Image (cartoon, helix red, strand yellow):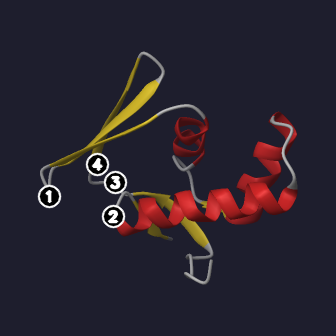
Amino acid sequence: MSESLPRVMIRNPDLVSADMDGETVMMSIANGAYFGIGGLGASVWQMLETPQDLDTMVAVIMAEYDVEDATCRADLRGFLADLLRNDLIQPV
């Protein structure tokens, strides 16, 4: 993936989010849109409560799950790019 990510990212503070039965539901008041993520995505969302960089998030995920570095990094970059495109996270 050639899409560039910010070096350090954090949740967009303008979002309202809540945990609903293991799924994180977010609402963008500015866009009037709802988003939902579950599983590992919800764990990544939790991490993004504070500023995070890709390498730190990859290390946390690899310590918890049996996944190869390259796979973890590629999947996480794609997920973060989707969050960024939808204005759910922002650069620090």
Residue at left offset 52%, top offset 44%? 45
| Side (left or right) of 18 relative to 61 | left
* Classed neighbour count for the residue bearing mark 4: other residues with Cα under 10 Å, few (<14), some (14–19), many (≥20): some
| Side (left or right) of 25 relative to 61 | left
Element carrying mark 3: loop
Q: Which residue is mark 4?
A: 15
From this viewpoint, which residue is outermost toward the top?
21
* Classed neighbour count for the residue bearing mark 1: other residues with Cα under 10 Å, few (<14), some (14–19), many (≥20): few
Q: Which residue is mark 1?
A: 30
Residue at left offset 85%, top offset 58%? 69
Q: Are marks 3 and 1 in contact (CB under 8 Å)?
A: no
Q: Which residue is mark 2?
A: 87
Q: Nearer the viewer, residue 10 or 41?
A: 41
Q: Are marks 4 and 3 in contact (CB under 8 Å)?
A: yes
User: Nearer the viewer's eye, disc 2 or disc 4?
Assistant: 2
Q: Which residue is mark 3?
A: 13
Residue at left offset 56%, top offset 76%? 5
What amino acid is labelled 1 in the image?
Ala
Residue 91: mark = none
Element carrying mark 2: loop
Image quadrant of residue 1? bottom right
Q: Are marks 2 and 4 in contact (CB under 8 Å)?
A: no
What amino acid is labelled 2 in the image?
Asp
